[in-house]
Amino acid sequence: MVSELATRIGAELLGQGADIEIDEVCALDEASAAGISFVSARKYLPALRATRAAAVILTPELAAEAPCACLVVDNPTLAFARVVELLHPRRPPPAGWHPSAVVAASAQIHPSASIGALCVIEEGVVIEAGVEIGPHCVIQRDSLIGEQTRLVAAVTVCARSLIGKRVLLHPGAVIGREGFGFARDGERWIRIPQIGRVRLGDDVEVGSNSAVDRGAIGETVIGDGVKIDNLIQIGHNVEVGENTAMAACSGISGSTRIGKNCTIAGAVGVAGHLEIADDVHFTGMAMVTRSFEQAGAYSSGIPAMPSADWRRSVARFRHLDEMARRLRRLEEQVTELQDAQPRSSPERWRENSDKTA
C-alpha cells in the first residue's frame, strides 16, 4: 500500500489514496492506477499534472501540483531507488556450482556462493560467502572475491586481483589485465611485464566492457564506493579515492591519483602521473593535462556549433600565431608613440601645482 511504502522510505504522505495497492514503478507518462513514479525537477511539471500514477515521490514544493497521493521527501531520486528495491527485488541464484563450471581443486569456495554455467575458477582462488559468479566468468589464479560480490556475466578477473565486498561487475568487465607498457628496441616495441595487481574496495561498481589494469609494479587501487560506468579505461598504478564516480568513455592514464568524492563526466581524458584533489569535478569531454590541487568544477573542450561557423573557426586557427605577433608589434608601437608625445598642458599644470603646494 501507499501508506506502507511511505513508512518504509521515511516519507510524509499527503493526499488521497493511502490504501491503494502499489505493484510497480513506472514513468510519469506511462503510469498505471497501481504504479508509483517520482519527480526530481520542475521541468517535469507538465507530466506530473497529467500522470495517472497512484502515487508520486516528490519534494515539498511540488506536492501541490500532483493529482494523486504524494510521498514527500527531500531527495526523490534516492527515495525512488529504495522503492524499486522494495517492489522489484532481485532473485539470487541458488548456491552451488553449475555442472559445466571448471573449478580448480585448490580453490576455496564458500558453500553459499553460486558459480554459473561455463565459469572457470583457477588455482588458489578464494570466493567468500554470498558471492554470485554469473555465466562465462573467468577468475584467474590467487584472486580473492569478497562477500556478497556479484559478477553478472562474462567478467574476467585476472591473476592475484583482490575484489572487495558487495562489488558489482557488469558483463564484459576486465579486472587486472596487463597494462599498456612497452620499451623501444630500435624500431620495435618490447612489452614490459606488468607484475602488480588490482585492489577494488567495498561497494565498487564497474560497468560493461570497462577495464582496470593491474599495477606495473605495486597496485592499482580503486577505493570504497567508487562507481565506474561502461567503456572506461583505468591504467596501471592509478589510485581512485572513495566515492568518486566516472561516466562512460572516460580514460585515466597510468600512475594518476584521483581524490575522494570526485566526478568525471563522459569522455574525459586524464593524462598520466597527475594529482587530482578531493571534490574535483570535470565536465564532459574535458582534457586533463595537469594536476588540480583545489576542489571545484573544471571544463575544457569546444561546444558544438553550426558547421559553417566551425569551418571558419578552424580556418583561423592556423593564423593565430601570426595574429598574436602582429598584435604584439602594434602594442609596442602604441607604447613608443605614447612615450614620444609631449605632455599636454593639463598634465604640466598639475605638475606645477604639485610643486607650488
Image (cartoon, rainbow, N blue to C red):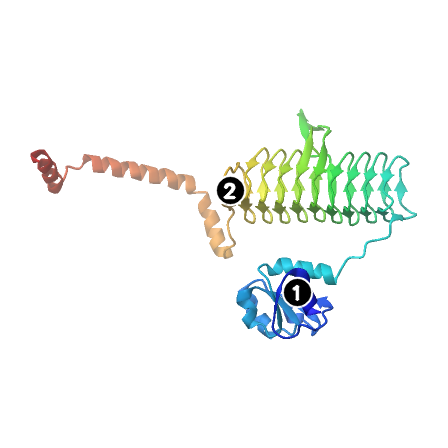
Q: Distance between the Cα atoms at labels 1 and 2?
A: 37 Å
Q: Residues within 10 Å of mark 2 (few under 14, many from 20)?
A: some
Residue type at mark 1: give it.
Answer: Ala
Specify whether 311 is left or right of 262. Answer: left
Kind of residue indicated by mark 2? Ala
| Residue farthest left in this picture | 356
Place residue 349 in its image quadrant.
Answer: top left
Q: Position of residue 189 (x, y in %)?
A: 69, 29
Q: Nearer the viewer, residue 168 or 122?
A: 168
Q: Which residue is mark 1?
A: 6
1 vs 2, front mark: 1
Closer to the chain start, of discs 1 and 2, is 1
Q: Position of residue 83 (x, y in %)?
A: 69, 61
> x and y percent of residue 179 in the render?
70, 34
Q: Is residue 187 visible?
A: no
Please give left or right for residue 141 compared with residue 226 in the image. Answer: right
Helix, strand or loop status at disc 2: loop
Quadrant placement of the N terminus: bottom right
> Where 196 falls versus 54 (above or below)?
above
Could you say where residue 284 lies in the image, as x and y percent from the top left?
56, 49
- Quarter containing the C terminus: top left
* Vertical arrangement, residue 230 with respect to residue 252, above or below: below
Residue at image position (58%, 62%) is: 40
Identified at 67% across, 68% down, the residue is 3
Q: Residue furthest right?
A: 99
Residue 295's label in the rendered image is: 2
The image quadrant that residue 8 belongs to is bottom right
Q: How many marks?
A: 2
